[in-house]
Image: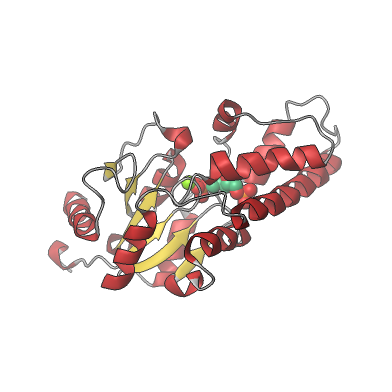
């Protein structure tokens, strides 16, 4: 196949931080509500959560934080059990907040999804969070029929090796039955970018609130949002896709 013949067929979306500011306004707040509900005095402020985001996965992040807390259960099994309870409770608070409409889509996200849909460019999700959290968020942002618009949704249950591991992106490509060069990923974090690139997929980045000054070397583009001038329209995304294929 020649370079020019590589068609652009799908956009694979990260969820947390890319589709909405779910880390700062969703998961972080929900973790704090879970701590409070469990009678714990633990709270994660925004800068601390930014540090903790180096650990992918909410449960893994919590276990990492518990390592440095003197009031966390000392034994491994007890600590694990508490972390799992808190993580479950966090997800319930998260779903409640999302269902209340407290989390909005980032600028341009729904517009670009609609443009892709109308032009027959397939949509997929590749995320480190759970399928239930994706369901909660996309139901709130898109509607009850959101799943019909996505040809593949790969979440933590299917891809336990979390970003920057490319597993989730490779599984999304498998589900779409596409080659890496036929897709384009949109991410908000260095780990997400690394995961997409390691799967051989070109990736553009709209940095999330916690990654404003991060290093995004290897990204096709980095922009404040999909609506930042010039807006990331489908024709522009097609050009970036072609340029990425030619450069690879
Ligand atoms: C998202 C994550 C997730 C969320 C919380 O990363 O790391 O862990 O923070 O969700 P990405 P869970 O956007 O790169 O996919 O609590 O369900 O893990
Ligand atoms: Mg993300």
For residue 122, what is the image quadrant? Answer: bottom left
Figure label count: 0
Q: Quadrant of the N terminus?
A: bottom left
7 or 15: nearer the viewer: 15
Q: Position of residue 206 (x, y in %)?
A: 36, 43
Residue at point 13%, 64% (across, down): 4
Q: Is residue 195 visible?
A: yes
Q: Is residue 163 visible?
A: no
Residue at point 21%, 46% (across, down): 230
Residue at point 46%, 42% (across, down): 191
For residue 149, what is the image quadrant? Answer: bottom left
Q: Is residue 37 left or right of residue 242?
A: right
Residue at point 62%, 55% (across, down): 100
Q: Position of residue 21 (x, y in %)?
A: 49, 44
Name above or below for residue 194 compared with residue 114.
Answer: above
Q: Position of residue 98 (x, y in %)?
A: 60, 54
Q: Is residue 118 left or right of residue 199?
A: left
200 or 238: nearer the viewer: 238
Q: Is residue 72 left or right of residue 145?
A: right
88 or 1: nearer the viewer: 88
- Colouring scheme applied when the structure was drawn: secondary structure
């Amino acid at each position: 196949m020649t370079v020019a013949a590589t068609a652009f067929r799908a956009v694979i979306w990260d969820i947390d931080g890319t589709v909405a500011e779910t880390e700062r306004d969703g998961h972080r707040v929900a973790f704090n509500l879970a701590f409070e509900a469990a009678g714990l005095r633990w709270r994660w402020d925004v800068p601390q959560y930014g540090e903790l985001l180096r650990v992918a996965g909410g449960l893994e992040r919590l276990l990492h934080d518990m390592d440095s807390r003197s009031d966390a259960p000392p034994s491994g099994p007890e600590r694990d059990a508490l972390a799992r309870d808190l993580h479950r409770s966090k997800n319930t608070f998260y779903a409640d907040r999302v269902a209340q409409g407290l989390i909005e889509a980032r600028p341009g996200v729904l517009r670009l999804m609609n443009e892709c849909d109308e032009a027959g460019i397939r949509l997929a999700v590749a995320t480190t969070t759970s399928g239930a959290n994706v369901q909660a968020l996309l139901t709130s942002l898109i509607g009850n029929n959101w799943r019909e618009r996505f040809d593949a949704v790969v979440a933590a249950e299917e891809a336990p090796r979390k970003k920057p591991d490319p597993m989730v992106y490779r599984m999304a490509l498998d589900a779409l039955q596409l080659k890496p060069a036929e897709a384009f990923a949109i991410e908000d974090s260095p780990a997400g970018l690394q995961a997409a690139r390691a799967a051989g997929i070109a990736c553009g980045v709209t940095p999330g609130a916690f990654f404003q000054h991060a290093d995004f070397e290897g990204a096709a583009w980095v922009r404040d949002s999909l609506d930042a001038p010039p807006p990331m329209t489908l024709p522009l995304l097609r050009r970036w896709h072609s340029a990425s294929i030619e450069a690879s």
